[in-house]
Amino acid sequence: MYGKFRLRQVLLNLTHIQMKIYRIILLLTLLANVAIAQENNPELLKMQQEYKAAGLPIPQGLQPEVGKPMPDFTLNKVTSYGSNNVSLKDFKGKWLILDFWATTCATCIASFPKMNAIQEKFKDQLQIILIGDNASKYGKNIQNMYEKVKKARELKLVSAYDSLLKRNYGIVGVPHQIIIDDKGMVIARTPSVTEGQLEKLFKGETVIFSGGKSNSIDAFDDNGNLNNNEYLLYSSSFSKSILTEKMRVPDINDHSEKIKETGLFCIAKWHLAGLYNLAYTGKASGPMIFSETQYGKTAAWPVVEVSDKSLFNHNFSEADQTGVSMKGVYNYSVRIPKENATVENVKKAMQMDLKKYFGYDVSKEKRLIRCMKLVVMPKITLKIKTKGGDANKTVLNQTGMSMISQKIDYFIPLLVGLNQNGPIIYNETGIDYNVDLKVDAMMDDLSAVKKELQKSGLDLVEFEKELEVLVIKDPTKK
């Protein structure tokens, strides 16, 4: 009996080893086929050499190029469609948008309702496919996450889960959309598309898209001169930002060494309220939770009290009436002598330029500002003290959070980060121990987050707090 058992174990071990060998042989075969395909494709080899020389991730397949036929592709794991597998030929005669996204991209997820509305409006002539990156530890649960968003937002979009296509196309950042016309030609590669832009495309009109891979340029050259301005007359300049420029939004406070070294500060593709914030606080997007000296002491954004607020309205993805520049979005550059190149002097120069170009009066005032505080509910015995566990397994994304053995302070910056236009949130729980906390809600919906926190004995409470705020007003008449 014992001999039969040993023989069975040996056979099982042999089978296990054979399976490992088979997998290795299969992998080597696939790699060999890729290498052969690359050797037989000089165009792909040339492109890979160019990417390598530029220090960019090397694409493993031919790139979709604007103005050229879209290379064929196959997508597996397709949902909400008639087939689990699709390829380019399945959409012949129809416009197609491949919308690449990832679980770590809040902008991507926030765009889903807009894309859903576009799909519904143009369903007879357009197909949108969301392509989720299912690679790495952040992508392994991407399908479950999308299903939650789909249910919460009532989406009907076709979705696929594939990381190979993203890698083949050399896509580094998301959102990234590839727009293909009904003849299979690549029309654009862009972070976003609007209903108005698509209507123009369907009519055969020319549309300039934001930040496309094939037509993206830097707003400034190495010397700080504006690329889209032929003559620079002053040591500082404002210009309207055009769609094809790259966004470049540094904080003055974080660039003191660079400013001392060059006497130069540049910001590209930013809105007017953000420019005023930058000039007076040193931060382009308002005090963040991670800044202990500013967070909770000053309001995140300026209060605009002007008769005509049109200059403060902005759109990062669509051109204004010129068809090229963007509404309410600007570039700014300032150069000051190196001997005077300090953060404070750059801020003063920017303040003077804003006054010169736009004329508004600016003051710092104390105002009552809507805030929120995280508190322990009264007459509640908390049961969130950690039972131990791996803190690295904490997960937070747009659809919820599972926090393991973390300080409660860990939760607030993550919540603020997903609600950047929301209120300042203070921690007034008094909890000094590590906690286990789960929130199953869309994290950009603070009312839903509040209900979930109440299940654990916590609450988000609104209140008003006197904070220092930047106030922008019409110029005083003399």
Image (tube, rainbow, N blue to C red):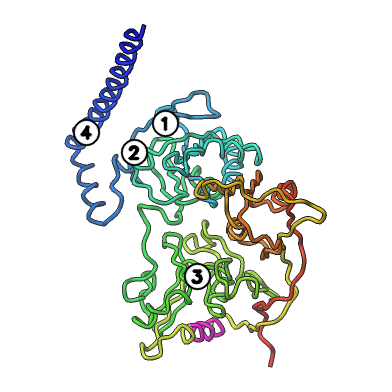
Mark closest to the chain's N terminus, 2 or 1: 2
Q: Position of residue 475 (x, y in %)?
A: 66, 85
Mark closest to the chain's N terminus, 3 or 2: 2
Q: Residues within 10 Å of mark 1 (few under 14, many from 20)?
A: some
Q: Secondary structure at mark 3?
A: strand
Name the residue carrying label 1. Answer: 75
Name the residue carrying label 3. Answer: 330
Q: Position of residue 343 (x, y in %)?
A: 46, 82
Name the residue carrying label 2. Answer: 69
Q: Is residue 8 visible?
A: yes
Residue depth check, mark 2 versus mark 1: number of the one nearer the observer: 1
Q: Image quarter for residue 61?
A: top left
As for residue 353 lying within the magenta part, the answer is yes
Which amino acid lies under the numbered mark 4 shown in the image of this protein? Answer: Ala
Residue depth check, mark 2 versus mark 4: number of the one nearer the observer: 4
Residue plotted at (30% across, 15% down): 10
Residue 371 shown left or right of residue 415 in the figure: right
Q: Position of residue 124 (x, y in %)?
A: 56, 32
- The N terminus appears in which quarter of the rendering? top left
Instruction: Estimate the spatial distance between the alpha carbons at disc 3 and disc 2, rounded to whole Å.
Output: 35 Å
Q: Are marks 2 and 1 in contact (CB under 8 Å)?
A: no
Residue depth check, mark 3 versus mark 2: number of the one nearer the observer: 3
Placement of 210 over or under 347, stated as above or below? above
Placement of 184 over or under 12, stated as above or below? below
Instruction: Estimate the spatial distance between the alpha carbons at disc 2 and disc 4, rounded to whole Å.
Output: 20 Å
Name the residue carrying label 4. Answer: 37
Q: Which residues are magenta?
A: 347-356
Q: Which sits in the foreground, 285 or 411? A: 411
Q: Residues within 10 Å of mark 3 (few under 14, many from 20)?
A: many
